Image (tube, rainbow, N blue to C red):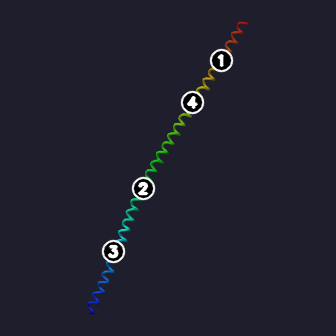
Amino acid sequence: RSASSKASRLELELADTRARHYSTESQLKALGDSWLEAEERGAELREQAASESKALEDSRAEAQALRNSIQEVTLQSEFEAESMAAKVLREEAALEASRADAAERRAEAA
């Protein structure tokens, strides 16, 4: 009878150990699945961050190109304004010289 009771107790312990083993296996599987999901989400976030970083870099390059274009147009406009001012000064000087020449001729004629 003692052997039968011991066998029953051992069977109960074995059943309890198996239940804990299956429970632990289920927990490990759930942790593994959770870990894989976290890894996949991390990869998605890294990819998204890289994409956003590239878009920001492209946007900065585009902004710099626009600034360069504006600077070029500004410099061209300033050059044209200075050229126009120089032309006006030359024309005013030529007109003044022409007036002086005409006044000199009138003085000689008189």
Residue bearing mark 3: 22
The residue at the far bottom in this view is: 1
Q: Residue at x 54, y 34 (%)?
A: 73
Q: Point out residue 58 in the picture as x, y percentages from the top left corner.
A: 46, 45
Residue bearing mark 4: 79
Q: Which class describes the residues within 10 Å of circle 1: few (<14), some (14-19), or many (20+)?
A: few
The residue at the far right in this view is: 110
* Mark 2 or 1, nearer chain start: 2
Q: Are marks 3 and 1 in contact (CB under 8 Å)?
A: no
Spatial separation of the CA atoms under disc 2 and disc 1: 72 Å
Residue 46: give its label.
2
Q: Point out residue 41 in the picture as x, y percentages from the top left corner.
A: 41, 59
Residue bearing mark 1: 95
The quadrant in which the N terminus is found is: bottom left
* Mark 3 or 4, nearer chain start: 3
Q: Which class describes the residues within 10 Å of circle 4: few (<14), some (14-19), or many (20+)?
A: few
Spatial separation of the CA atoms under disc 3 and disc 4: 84 Å
